[in-house]
Image (tube, rainbow, N blue to C red):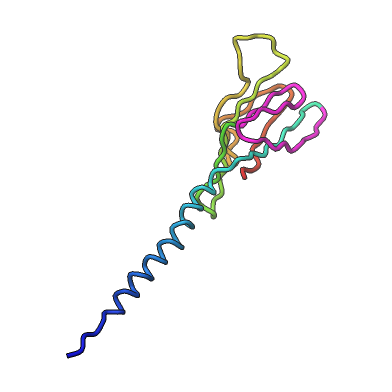
Amino acid sequence: MLFKKNIGLGKTKFNLIIFLFLIAPLFAYSEQNLEGSYTSIKILDKISSKNILVKLKNGQAKKHKDLLIKSMKCKNSEFDDNPEITAYIQVSDLTKKDKDDVFVFNGWMFSSSPSINPFDHPVYDIWLVSCY
């Protein structure tokens, strides 16, 4: 009597292992890709009516005229049909000498709804543009 090896079961296990090793990193990459390391904001000077695009590395402060701007974290939305960009931004006014008021703005900013948590400054206006 001849014994047959169950080669079909071995191939199935091997294919499953290969599938898991090839597909699992793609899911992990898509989750990591949502959070960016750079934030782009647009700053409008209300007096001169000029705007400038500023690229901020998350965690580092950048000086723009009288403002010191720091982006702590930014994240892209999970859905492609309704893109939403959120960023945690801190803005200090360097002209103020009052030590009680540390930040002019300190909170989350949303690209689709800037009026939810507005940046209120007499000279400048800030909009969130992108996260990458």
* Helix, strand or loop for the magenta stretch, by majority: strand
Q: Report the number of discs.
A: 0
Q: Position of residue 69 (x, y in %)?
A: 67, 27
Asked which quadrant contains residue 81, the reply is bottom right
Residue at 77% x, 36% y is: 52
Magenta part of the chain? 48-71
Q: Where is residue 94 in the image (x, y as percent from the top left)?
A: 71, 17
Q: Which of 57 and 77 is in front in this view?
A: 57
Residue at 80% x, 26% y is: 47
Residue at 64% x, 24% y is: 91
Residue 64 shown in magenta: yes
Asked which quadrant contains residue 45, the reply is top right
Q: Which of the image's four quarters has the N terminus?
A: bottom left
Q: Which of 6 and 68 is in front in this view?
A: 6
Q: Which of 46 and 84 is in front in this view?
A: 84
Q: Which of 16 and 114 is in front in this view?
A: 16
Residue at 59% x, 9% y is: 100
Q: In this view, does 81 lie above or below 128?
A: below
Q: Position of residue 27 (x, y in %)?
A: 46, 55
Q: In this view, does 57 lie above or below 122?
A: below
